[in-house]
Image (spheres, grey):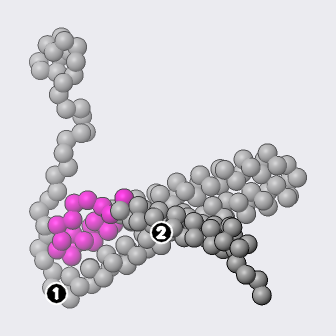
Amino acid sequence: MRTDPTDNGGLFVGRRPGTAPVKYRSLPDRGSPARQRLDRALALAILALMIFLSLLYWGPMPAVALWVASQVQFQTDNLGFGLLVGFVSLLVLLFGGLMVLKRLDALWILVRRAAGIDQRSGVIGRVFGATAVIGATLFFAWLLLIEGPGSSLAPTG
């Protein structure tokens, strides 16, 4: 038998179970032009929602985690417990948001295929990369121009 380890020196050189290439079905029958426009608009709305959720990673999510940590620290008067709750809440927010983004990405692929576009890969990487550049740019602009040395050098009148 080909998969017997003694035939190939103890190495399993064949494909592992569950790792076969993904085979997509053929494109569905095209709908009416109005239906395709609706599906394209829905795909655009899903993409906008993904961009919005990705932008939340660069400010609001960490701010919520800091707020929760400060409230816990204030109520319990225990800094260590407040830090622990802050880190745990940040991880829950980040990974929960990633789960939502991954599901939206799969939905985006399906809607694009329903619109008659041969979409085989998602857009989550490009969206997250673009929002990372936007978030980092806005953060450094805030840091250097508003709260950093630029704000103290500005004339006060």
On the rendered structure, is 97 left or right of 154?
left
Between residue 53 and residue 137, name the one nearer to us: 137
Badge 1 marks a residue whose secondary structure is helix
Q: On residue 134, which mark appears? A: 2
Which image quarter is the C terminus in?
A: bottom right
In the image, 134: left or right of 28? right
> Which residue is found at the position 17% from the left and 74% from the top?
116
Looking at the rendering, which quadrant does residue 21 occupy?
Answer: top left
Instruction: Give the x, y percent position of residue 92.
Output: 59, 54
Mark 2 neighbour class, 10 Å CA radius: few under 14, some 14 to 19, many 20 or more: few
Q: Locate the N terminus and report the quarter of the image it occupies.
A: top left
Residue situated in front as seen by the camera: 29 or 80: 80
Query: Which label is found at residue 33?
Result: 1
Q: Which residues are magenta?
A: 107-125
Q: Quadrant of residue 105?
A: bottom left
Secondary structure beneath disc 2? Answer: helix
Given the image, on which type of amino acid does mark 1 rest? Pro
Can residue 103 be seen in this snapshot?
no
Q: Residue at x 17, y 67 (%)?
A: 118
Q: Amino acid at mark 2?
A: Ile
Q: Does the magenta run of residues contain 120?
A: yes
Determine the image quadrant of residue 5.
Answer: top left
* Residue 31 visible in the snapshot: yes
